[in-house]
Amino acid sequence: MNVSLPNDMKAWVEEQVKVGGYGTTSEFFRELLREARQRQLREEIDRKLLAAIDGGKPVPADEKFWKQLRRDAQKRLRTLRAR
């Protein structure tokens, strides 16, 4: 894969490679792509969480709710420890 850049961008990339401790320009671009992928995954997760929040039935987070949640978590922890 080849990427063409204007001279000012090329100079900026070369400077980033030097100051960022990258061995090559390819390493720099791979890092940018990994970060873009992670950002995209986080955005997808956020969209799904918001959709779940908007689409779910409201649950009152009262004392009864927290006690049951604690019991369920303790039960699950005991199950995991028994394995």
Image (spheres, rainbow, N blue to C red):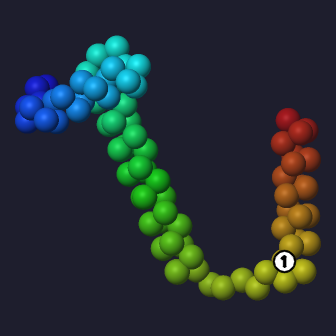
Picture quadrant of residue 16: top left
Residue 18 visible to an observer of this rendering: yes
- Compared to residue 34, the image places residue 70 above or below, namely below
Considering the image in quadrants, where does the N terminus appear?
top left
Please tell me which residue is depicted at 90% across the width and 80% down the height of the picture. 63
Considering the image in quadrants, where does the C terminus appear?
top right
Image side of residue 62 versus residue 54, left or right: right
Question: Which residue is nearer to you in this view: 30 or 22?
Answer: 22
Q: Residue 9, image x and y in percent?
A: 16, 36
Q: Residue 59, image x and y in percent?
A: 72, 83
Question: Which residue is nearer to you in this view: 16 or 30?
Answer: 16
- Compared to residue 73, the image places residue 83 above or below, namely above
Q: Amino acid at mark 1?
A: Phe
Image side of residue 2 versus residue 77, left or right: left
User: What residue is shown with label 1?
Assistant: 65
Please tell me which residue is depicted at 43% across the width and 58% down the height of the picture. 43
